Image: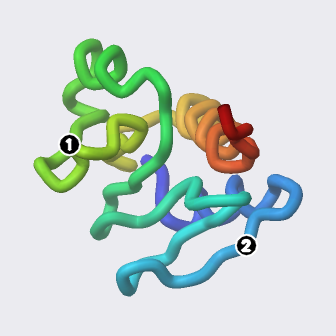
Amino acid sequence: MQTEDDVRHICLSFPGVTERLSWGNPAWFARTLMARMWEDGVLTVKTRERDALAGTSPDIFFWTPHHERSPELVLVRLDQISAEELAELLDDSYRIAGTVRKAR
């Protein structure tokens, strides 16, 4: 079972990541938001594989109507995810949140 402290430890291990409150909950930022506690035991992260994750592991990954307009956001049940999978997911989220998008 992973905890908010585990998330904090992983997030703050990435260069340049800061922690501050977002909507009253702890959140971690690279260039943009990379992770936020949604509610106790539930984390929001960025991924480009939301549909695949929720399709293969709906007990771990899901989203609410609030997240429909943000297809890179997925909610993660911390009591269902392994330490390795959480670290991998946060690494992916860090890369997405820290990328500077070029204007077309």
> What percent of the width, then of the height, locates residue 16?
85, 63
Identify the secondary structure beneath mark 2: strand
- The amino acid beneath tag 1 is Glu
Vertical order, 68 against 50 (above or below) = below
Which quarter of the picture shows residue 94? Answer: top right
The picture places residue 12, in percent across and down from the top left corner, at 75, 63
Q: Give the residue pinned by disc 1.
A: 68
- N-term-proximal mark, 2 vs 1: 2
x and y percentages locating residue 103 in the rendered image: 69, 39
In the image, 85 versus 44, the foreground residue is 44
Query: Distance between the Cα atoms at labels 2 and 1?
Result: 26 Å
Q: Position of residue 68 (x, y in %)?
A: 20, 42
Q: Residue at x 36, y 81 (%)?
A: 23
The extreme right residue here reads 15
Q: Amino acid at mark 2?
A: Thr
| Disc 2: CA contacts within 10 A as few (<14), some (14-19) or many (>=20) | some
